[in-house]
Amino acid sequence: MTRSNRPSLGALAFFAFAFAIGTYFTFAAVQGDFGLFRRVEISAERNMLQRDLATLDAEVDRMENLTRRLSDDYLDLDLLDQQARSVLGLLRSDEIVIR
């Protein structure tokens, strides 16, 4: 008897199974929960949150400065006058208001 050059059915099944497993792991590495696309999304979100944090830090610093300038230890009279005018609507007697 002569053997044919055709691979056996078991070898074809093995290589088909190995190809399927390789394809699955490649897909998971690219689009899975911990894949490359998710990593890019997380990086973009981190950059956006860092910008938001920098903006909020600047706002906190500004508000701390204003609070310190209105404290009992250091009173900025110009800032106090500005706040009284904007919040309370106070005016000096020699001022004229035009709306």
Image (cartoon, rainbow, N blue to C red):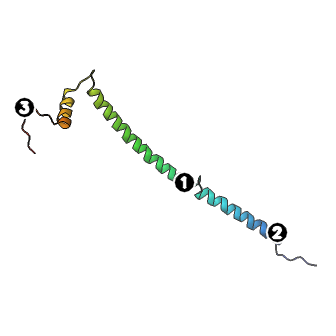
Residue at the (70%, 61%) spot, across then down: 21
In the image, residue 94 above or below residue 2: above
Q: Earlier in the sequence, mark 3 or mark 2?
A: 2
Residue at the (58%, 58%) spot, across then down: 31
Quadrant of res 80: top left
Q: Earlier in the sequence, mark 1 or mark 3?
A: 1
Residue 18 x/y as whole percent: 74, 63
Say whether marks 3 and 2 touch (CB < 8 Å). Answer: no
Would residue 83 be found to the left or right of residue 58 on screen? left
Cα distance, mark 1 to mark 3? 64 Å
Q: Secondary structure at mark 3?
A: loop
Residue at the (62%, 56%) spot, across then down: 29
Q: Residue furthest front?
A: 88
Of badges 1 and 3, the one in the foreground is 3
Would residue 65 be found to the left or right of residue 10 on screen? left
Q: Residues within 10 Å of mark 3 (few under 14, many from 20)?
A: few
Read off the residue under disc 3. Answer: 93
Quadrant for the N terminus, please.
bottom right
Quadrant of res 58: top left
Residue type, mark 3 in image: Ser
Would residue 61 be found to the left or right of residue 86 on screen? right
Read off the residue under disc 1. Answer: 38
Q: Residues within 10 Å of mark 1 (few under 14, many from 20)?
A: some
In the image, residue 67 above or below residue 5: above
Q: Residue furthest right?
A: 1
Residue type, mark 1 in image: Arg
Q: Earlier in the sequence, mark 1 or mark 2?
A: 2
Quadrant for the C terminus, please.
top left
Read off the residue under disc 2. Answer: 10
In the image, residue 98 above or below residue 4: above
